[in-house]
Amino acid sequence: MLIRNISKQILEGLAAGLLITIGCCVYLGCDTKWVGAILFSVALLSICLLNFSLFTGRIGFLLDNLKKDYISGLLLGLLGNVIATAVVGIAVQYAIPSLHGTAAVMCAAKLEQQLWQTFVRAILCGVLMYIAVSVYKYKKSVLGIVFCIPAFILSGFEHSIADMGYFAIAGVYSARAFGFIWIVILGNALGALLIPLGALLVRGRKTEAEGKTEAVEVNSEVQLESEAACDVCESGKAKNGTDCNATEQEGVADGDNVEEVRL
């Protein structure tokens, strides 16, 4: 059963990596950037509809699923993403030489970025990826995907799995490229978690405020009950001409007399 689950999670990651690499090919093959950006969204649409495992699409929901199974599935899915983009990318490099040249120019420009620039671009991509997938997941709408994917591509943001595909197609396997990919992975993860973290903080403050409100309400009720008891006592004193405190003292004295008789 364990081996079956592991195999399933890796296969889902492989399928997602395959689709992302196809999206890379589509984008590289388009002369018009905005057309390629729109068509790239077909990859994420297919991944969401078929429930494949894309790291950048699932990392944003980690806070709601802090379980061993989800975390292992996330990492195994990432492994599948890496393997698929590498294998398919290398195949495309030799099968479609024109895409290889375009990808090489693109990757050379990416590696000229400073590390902090890459990290910021990756964070912003992660934010849009979370929005795209969450709109599909919670609202059952593909509008988030259709708009957010072209948005991050045209903005020049960095998507870790897509970058793996581009580097594989370009045939770039340097240590700098490896470090670049890891920075993008971390940035994508942080960006995807920003909105959930904010929502978690807001929920925590809301719960704390509700707790304080309930405490105030309870104290008000106790105070009202105390005041009502005092009103009853005052009305009884006015009617019987006795003092509540005196009555209580008499009760205590009677109790003492009873104790004396028993002794």
Image: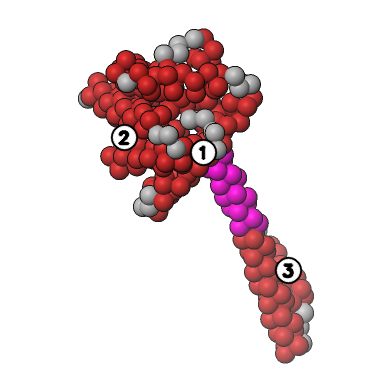
SS class, disc 3? helix
The mark found on residue 154 in the picture is: 1
For marks 1 and 2 on the same chain, the one whose residue lies earlier in the sequence = 2
* Separation (CA) of disc 1 from disc 2: 25 Å
Q: What is the x, y in percent for residue 122?
A: 55, 30
Front residue of 223/169: it is 169
The residue wearing badge 3 is 253
Residue drawn at 72 percent across, 85 percent down: 235
Asked if the residue under mark 2 is in contact with the one under mark 1, i.e. CB atoms within 8 Å, the reply is no
The residue wearing badge 2 is 52
At label 1, the amino acid type is: Leu
Q: Is residue 116 toward the left or the right of residue 169 in the image?
A: right
At label 3, the amino acid type is: Ala
Asked if the residue under mark 3 is in contact with the one under mark 1, i.e. CB atoms within 8 Å, the reply is no
At label 2, the amino acid type is: Phe
* Separation (CA) of disc 1 from disc 3: 90 Å
* Separation (CA) of disc 2 from disc 3: 82 Å
Residue drawn at 59 percent across, 27 percent down: 119
Chain part drawn in magenta: 189-212
Residue 193 in the magenta stretch? The answer is yes
Asked if the residue under mark 3 is in contact with the one under mark 2, i.e. CB atoms within 8 Å, the reply is no
Q: How is the image coloured?
A: secondary structure
Front residue of 15/98: it is 98
Residue drawn at 49 percent across, 14 percent down: 178
Residue 158 visible (yes or no): yes
Q: Is residue 49 toward the left or the right of residue 123 in the image?
A: left
